[in-house]
Image: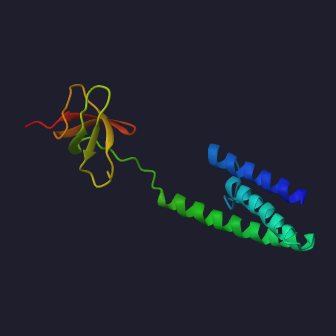
Amino acid sequence: MLVFIIIGLLGLALAITSLVIGDFFELADGALSGTSLGAGALLFGATGMVVLSSGLQPWVAYPAGLVVAVLVIILVNVMIKRLKAGDDGTPVSLVGIQGTVTSDVDRGHGEVSLDATTELETRLAFSDEPIEQGLRIIVVEQHGARVKVEPVPR
């Protein structure tokens, strides 16, 4: 039983480390990553513990844990590949996009709702001059997730 506990805890540590700092190793061109191996080891240990706790013999626990671990590794790899395929990673420039002030904007803070189809939520914004809620704005600069805005000329 101790073997399953140790392998499960090592798997948990590996999975958490891989998720927090990123996969620090990949084998077989990404077929085995830190995340998938950690998840597999965690479920190997958990499955072994469940089988042994059910009163079955260790010779049943090891193959059962191995089968579950392999299935989890495959599932995690499929999920990771789908997530990577869906991430285009192309930054979108918002300079020139118009919108509406949703919370008064000044030099330090404010929020705007932009008219771009990629913008589903409000963005943090700032401006050289105060802009009241409800006024139309245009984005003149982009700094990460924040945008610098100016009132739309009338």
Q: Is residue 71 left or right of residue 1?
A: left
Q: Is residue 102 left or right of residue 11?
A: left
Residue plotted at (92% across, 72% down): 57
Question: Residue 109 appears in which quarter of the rendering?
Answer: top left
Q: Residue 104's spot in the image, x, y percent? A: 24, 34
Q: Residue 69's spot in the image, x, y percent? A: 75, 66
Task: Looking at the picture, tell me which residue is in the foreground, 46 or 127.
Answer: 46
Q: Residue 33's spot in the image, x, y percent? A: 69, 56
In which quadrant of the rendered image does the C terminus lie?
top left
Question: Residue 152 appears in which quarter of the rendering?
Answer: top left
Total count of labels: 0
Examine the rendered structure and indicate whether residue 148 appears above or below residue 120.
above
Residue plotted at (71% across, 70% down): 71
Q: Residue furthest left?
A: 154
Residue plotted at (75% across, 70% down): 68
Q: Is residue 18 left or right of residue 90?
A: right
Residue plotted at (76% across, 54% down): 11
In which quadrant of the rendered image does the N terminus lie?
bottom right
Looking at the picture, the colour scheme in use is rainbow
Examine the rendered structure and indicate whether residue 145 appears above or below residue 60.
above
Task: Looking at the picture, tell me which residue is in the foreground, 49 or 153.
Answer: 49
Question: Residue 66 appears in which quarter of the rendering?
Answer: bottom right
Q: Is residue 154 left or right of residue 130?
A: left
